[in-house]
Image: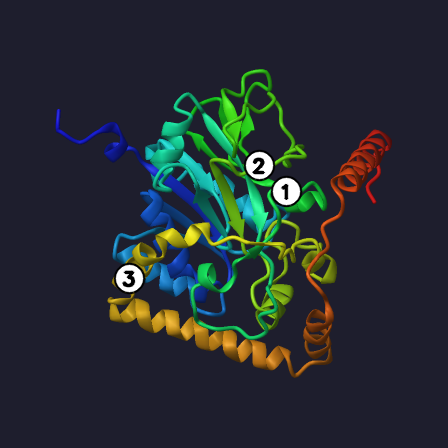
Amino acid sequence: MNNTSWKDQMRILAITTMRNEAPFLLEWIAYHQHIGVTDFLIYTNDCDDGTDVLLDRLAELGVVHHERNHSGGKKAVQWRALTKAQRHPVFAQADWIFVADVDEFLNIHAGAGKITDLMAAVPHADGFAIAWRMFGNAGILGFEDEPILEQFTKAAPEALLWPWRAVQYKSLYRQDPRYQKLGVHRPKVVNQSDNGHWVDGNGAPLPDNPNVFQYTTGPRYGLAQINHYALGAMESFLVKIARGKPNHTSDPIDLTYWSDRNFAQVDDQTILRHRPHVAERIATLKADIEVNRLHLAGVEWRTARIRALLQTVEGHSMVARLRQMAPTQVLAMADQDRLLRELMKIKAKERAQGTKS
């Protein structure tokens, strides 16, 4: 038996899918490496900016596991990747699983902000359902090759119920036979009555079969939150519109998407306590000449893509509208509560009738 602790031996696997995210990739990896992720399993599809080639190089260096996952077929590309991920050898070696997108950062408030600090705060937990905290655009117009964590610090308040998509969560959970299939927000369980012990971002127990959003009128980020940088700069948002959603290909990314996420009520810089360590790790990754070249090529591709989209009527008009829009208003909690309850009743009625609006 060696002298390393169980914490040192624990394997924490982050799983994600990407398309055209080269400028943001190194920061996301560096940050999650710093807080304790040991393995990355990344699927890419239909990349034009070299994200896939950059990941190939990082895989050669032993930083990530990279698999290509081409679009097409009946199943959405993200769901197809998650199905494949469960058959990957690194999945079987993982003690804990974290499924997230490249614009989602696990921000832990417990202790020194590491994943092991979160686990130590609730040692009996089998899973953490950690709510999104939406970080809005903050009036930033142009795309810059600068850290996302430093550019966007304006966020939603701690207590928020509406819009309901703004308070969904992502899961960090123990590898366990009870969790049959990977999910975007939570794993699918074999037996609904045996979910294990799950807690929220405050460490409070969750119901046995929770929704993909957390119904609470109070603060929800006592131990951890998911910093969700869904919008980015206004001009860069055009690239996201053109790409579309990875798991709902028919749903548009539009002004409704922007309005549901553009919060700016609170200046939240809690994640920046990790800034020096993240910067050091990014520099280490960029020390490889090929990694740095491919990163810069991705930046150049996005810059050129934005320039082209701004030359279209749709792109030019969209950015003009975004510049005119104020940050999303937060309604009184009583109104948020009423709207959510009404929506849940409507959805339940539609399910019973077999319809969907």
Q: Earlier in the sequence, mark 2 or mark 1?
A: 1
Residue 252 appears in the rendering: no
Measure the C-alpha gap from mark 1 to mark 3: 33 Å
Q: Report the coloring of the rendering.
A: rainbow
**Is 117 rendered above or below residue 165?**
above
Q: Residue at x 52, y 34 (%)?
A: 201
Q: Can you identify the residue that label 2 sits on?
A: 220
Q: Are marks 2 and 1 in contact (CB under 8 Å)?
A: yes
Disc number lying in front (3 or 2)? 2
Kind of element beneath mark 3 = helix
Residue 3 percent coordinates (x, y): 13, 29
Place residue 190 in its image quadrant: top right
Disc number lying in front (2 or 1)? 2
Q: Can you identify the residue that label 1 sits on?
A: 167
Q: Label 2 neighbourhood size at 10 Å, few (<14), some (14-19), many (20+)?
A: many
Q: Residue at x 49, y 22 (%)?
A: 178
Residue kind at label 2, given as amino acid type: Arg
330 sits to left or right of 115: right
Which quarter of the rendering shows the C terminus?
top right
Q: Earlier in the sequence, mark 1 or mark 3?
A: 1
Q: Are marks 1 and 3 in contact (CB under 8 Å)?
A: no
Residue kind at label 3, given as amino acid type: Leu
Q: Can you identify the residue that label 3 sits on?
A: 285
Q: Earlier in the sequence, mark 3 or mark 2?
A: 2
Q: Which mark is residue 294?
A: none
Residue 1 percent coordinates (x, y): 13, 24
Please state the total of marks drawn on the protein image: 3
